[in-house]
Image (cartoon, rainbow, N blue to C red):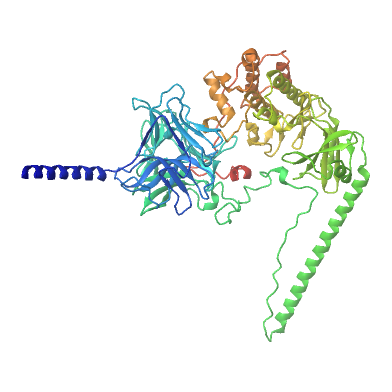
């Protein structure tokens, strides 16, 4: 009996010891196997919604810190306060040894799948063997996927370094988040050529801004996205490492190193206290963060290259933290300002405060008092005289304008002139809005039984004489592929244009895959492309003076009831005499459609040819040239075309909604090559619109010796310290970035 008792005690002690050993092990959940489906809701088991910044995390997989507790990497749903929208993300959270997430410090996102399109409550994340990860919103719409076709996925794993990995049955990586960085790098992560960090728009708007950091063949650049990109930081790669395609930047403990033929230190920074990450932030800074005493602290600013915060790209005006940053005069010189924001026929006033003199001191020296009275009287008299002169000049100017109003009348060759009151009645007090553009709003109206489109201009750029000269020019050109100008109004400050009504609206509403409309078939698309070419050919070749449109885009192409295309909106157009080949113009137009030579401000009609090429690509592909809702590698259509042309996969670009592609494949590819001819970086290698028209009419062949490099990065001059050379100021509109 004593033996039985002693055996029982030994067995009980063994069980208790084993139980204690198990409970002492860190409990985390770093893996998930396929198939698994998670629904984004508060019922998820690892939800923390008590962070001090109001954010919430719903962890799906978590890998504890090697020390068993502290800052650890997890992946799941994350939302900012007030938690109306969610992002599937990798984030750093504080965790205890039991795998529980602690409330301090707040989670930090290091990667996100769906910055451009957040999801709502009850969105689903599916892990399947054939698709990998697929994120759908609560209405079932596809938001994001890992796109691992023809690969069999066994599960997902979040690593100790914060890399979210899809692996197969052999535990080999199929896809990893480190290959698709967003705005953040973590320790051990690499940035190879072709990858970029793109900053958020602001701390609460996570859509991508224009600011990004990337490794090019000749250096590490921080850039403002434009055409071409503008540099605000550069670290040139040494000659020994330049051109090495295997070069990459690695975030190491204490430094950022270029790894190539020979390692090259780019940044030196404090060693990690706990877990570090670096983030390119909305204000242009690349900040290094470390977890110190249960809080996240910025321990270094790696792009600290300017003497003050106001020198960074997005710090102008009230967008800075204190609202006290304003651009220096050189950046906002009239030479660089956008002409459409300059108002005409208006007066400018400079308000100067006259500080009243201090009360006279009681003094027995009356001579000084008399001198003060004399100087004050003289100053007051001067101010009064200047005021009278200014008022007289203003009166003369108003009299002259009124005389012009009376004498202009109905000049020969001018379209019908309407009064503002007549157009107000015709549009029923501007009640039915058809659309809105960069220079005004378009309203539907009637003159008698005729339906018209009335464009009410704002942001007026010219005086009355210039406006009437433009009207006379536009009214004198007549072509079936130009929207007909019926009349105008120049009534005091009111400027309106009256056009023929186009019942099918603008082209952009038909080519960007709208569910409300059936996709255009190929013969219709071909006809539209030909119509646009003929309209531009007429403007460039057949008018008394060359007319440069300067804003060719789908929104400015209107369609009638038979889908005949007509060019509209000549608000930016310029005239060039036949004996001149070029004109100097400040940058204007629409991003995504601007030719490279706009950067020099010396342009020819070939800028319209380039814009035409972009429009043709959009018609062929059924998407915008710049689409920020797409993934980084697919965002820029022209860049994508360059990549596809080099891999002989151009047909992959064609709109999948286009029926009978096989039937028209030869013709479609010919038009695509025509677009590539129009998109040549060197304007001298682009065709004239006459040549384009001949190609479309099948009387001429497309040029075969094309340059397939369509996108160039032309950084601004920088000095040895990586600072931007201020002799080449950026445009204010480019520097400010989207808001």
Residue 198 relative to residue 94: left or right: right
* Image position, residue 325 (x, y; %): 58, 54
Residue 163 relative to residue 545: left or right: left
Residue 538 relative to residue 323: left or right: right
Residue 359 appears in the picture as rendered = yes
Give the quarter of the figure containing the C terminus.
top right
* Image position, residue 352 (x, y; %): 71, 63
Is residue 525 or residue 147 the one in the foreground?
A: 147
Is residue 734 or residue 150 the one in the foreground?
A: 150
* Image position, residue 71 (x, y; %): 36, 47
* Image position, residue 258 (x, y; %): 39, 36
Q: Residue at x 86, y 59 (%)?
A: 392
Give the quarter of the figure containing the N terminus.
top left
The part of the image, by quadrant, that contains residue 607 is top right
Q: Residue at x 93, y 39 (%)?
A: 410
Q: How many marks?
A: 0
Relative to 17, residue 133 above or below: above
Residue sitting farthest toward the bottom = 364
Is residue 163 or residue 56 the one in the foreground?
A: 56
Relative to 381, residue 537 above or below: above
């Amino acid at each position: 009996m004593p033996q039985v008792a002693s055996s029982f005690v030994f067995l009980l002690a063994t069980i208790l010891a084993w139980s204690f050993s198990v409970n002492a092990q860190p409990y985390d959940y770093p893996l998930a196997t396929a198939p698994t489906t998670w629904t984004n809701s508060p019922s998820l088991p690892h939800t923390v919604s008590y962070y001090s910044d109001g954010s919430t995390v719903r962890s799906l997989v978590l890998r504890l810190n090697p020390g068993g507790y502290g800052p650890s990497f997890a992946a799941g749903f994350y939302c900012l306060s007030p938690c109306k929208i969610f992002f599937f993300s990798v984030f750093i959270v504080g965790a205890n040894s039991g795998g529980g997430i602690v409330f301090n410090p707040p989670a930090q996102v290091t990667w996100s799948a769906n910055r451009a399109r957040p999801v709502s409550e009850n969105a689903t994340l599916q892990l399947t063997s054939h698709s990998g990860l697929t994120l759908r919103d609560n209405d079932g719409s596809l938001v994001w996927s890992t796109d691992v076709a023809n690969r069999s996925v066994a599960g997902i794993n979040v690593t100790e370094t914060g890399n979210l990995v899809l692996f197969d049955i052999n535990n080999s990586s199929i896809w990893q988040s480190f290959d698709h960085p967003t705005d953040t790098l973590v320790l051990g992560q690499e940035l190879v050529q072709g990858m970029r960090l793109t900053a958020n728009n602001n701390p609460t708007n996570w859509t991508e801004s224009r600011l990004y950091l990337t490794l090019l063949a000749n250096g590490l650049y921080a850039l403002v996205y434009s055409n071409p990109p503008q540099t605000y930081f550069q670290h040139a790669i040494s000659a020994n490492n330049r051109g090495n395609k295997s070069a990459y930047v690695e975030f190491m403990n204490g430094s950022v190193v270029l790894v190539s033929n020979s390692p090259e230190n780019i940044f030196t920074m404090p060693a990690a206290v706990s877990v570090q990450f670096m983030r390119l932030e909305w204000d242009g800074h690349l900040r290094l963060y470390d977890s110190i005493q249960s809080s996240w602290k910025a321990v270094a600013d790696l792009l600290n290259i300017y003497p003050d915060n106001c020198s960074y790209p997005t710090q102008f005006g009230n967008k800075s933290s204190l609202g006290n940053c304003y651009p220096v005069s050189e950046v906002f010189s009239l030479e660089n300002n956008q002409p459409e924001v300059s108002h005409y026929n208006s007066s400018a006033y400079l308000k100067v405060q006259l500080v009243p003199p201090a009360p006279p001191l009681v003094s027995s020296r009356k001579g000084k008092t008399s001198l003060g009275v004399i100087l004050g009287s003289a100053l007051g008299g001067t101010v009064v005289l200047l005021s009278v002169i200014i008022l007289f000049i203003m009166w003369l100017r108003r009299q002259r304008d009124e005389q012009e109003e009376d004498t202009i009348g109905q000049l020969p060759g001018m379209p019908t002139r309407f009064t503002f009151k007549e157009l107000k009645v015709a549009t029923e007090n501007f009640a039915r809005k058809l659309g809105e553009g960069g220079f005004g709003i378009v309203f539907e109206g009637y003159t008698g039984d005729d339906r018209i489109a009335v464009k009410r201009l704002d942001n007026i750029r010219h005086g009355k004489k210039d406006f009437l000269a433009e009207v006379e020019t536009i009214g004198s050109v007549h072509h079936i592929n130009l929207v007909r100008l019926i009349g105008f109004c120049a009534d005091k400050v009111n400027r309106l244009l009256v056009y023929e009504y186009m019942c099918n609206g603008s082209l952009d509403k038909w080519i960007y895959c709208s569910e409300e409309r059936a996709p255009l078939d190929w013969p219709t698309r071909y006809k539209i492309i030909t119509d646009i070419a003929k309209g531009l050919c007429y403007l460039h070749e057949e008018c008394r003076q060359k007319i440069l449109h300067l804003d060719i885009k789908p929104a400015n192409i209107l369609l009638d009831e038979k889908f005949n295309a007509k060019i509209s909106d000549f608000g930016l157009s310029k005239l060039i005499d036949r004996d001149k080949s070029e004109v100097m113009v400040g940058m204007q137009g629409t991003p995504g459609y601007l030719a490279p030579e706009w950067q020099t401000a010396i342009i020819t009609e070939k800028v319209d040819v380039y814009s035409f090429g972009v429009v043709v690509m959009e018609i062929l592909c059924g998407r915008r040239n710049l689409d920020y809702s797409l993934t980084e590698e697919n965002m820029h259509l022209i860049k994508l075309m360059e990549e596809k042309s080099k891999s002989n996969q151009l047909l992959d670009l064609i709109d999948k909604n286009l029926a009978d592609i096989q039937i028209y494949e030869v013709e479609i590819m010919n038009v695509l090559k025509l677009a590539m001819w129009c998109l040549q970086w060197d304007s001298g290698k682009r065709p004239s619109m006459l040549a384009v028209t001949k190609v479309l009419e099948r009387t001429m062949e497309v040029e075969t010796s094309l340059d397939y490099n369509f996108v160039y990065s032309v950084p601004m001059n920088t000095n040895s310290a990586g600072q931007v050379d201020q002799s080449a100021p950026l445009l204010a509109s480019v520097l400010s970035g989207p808001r």
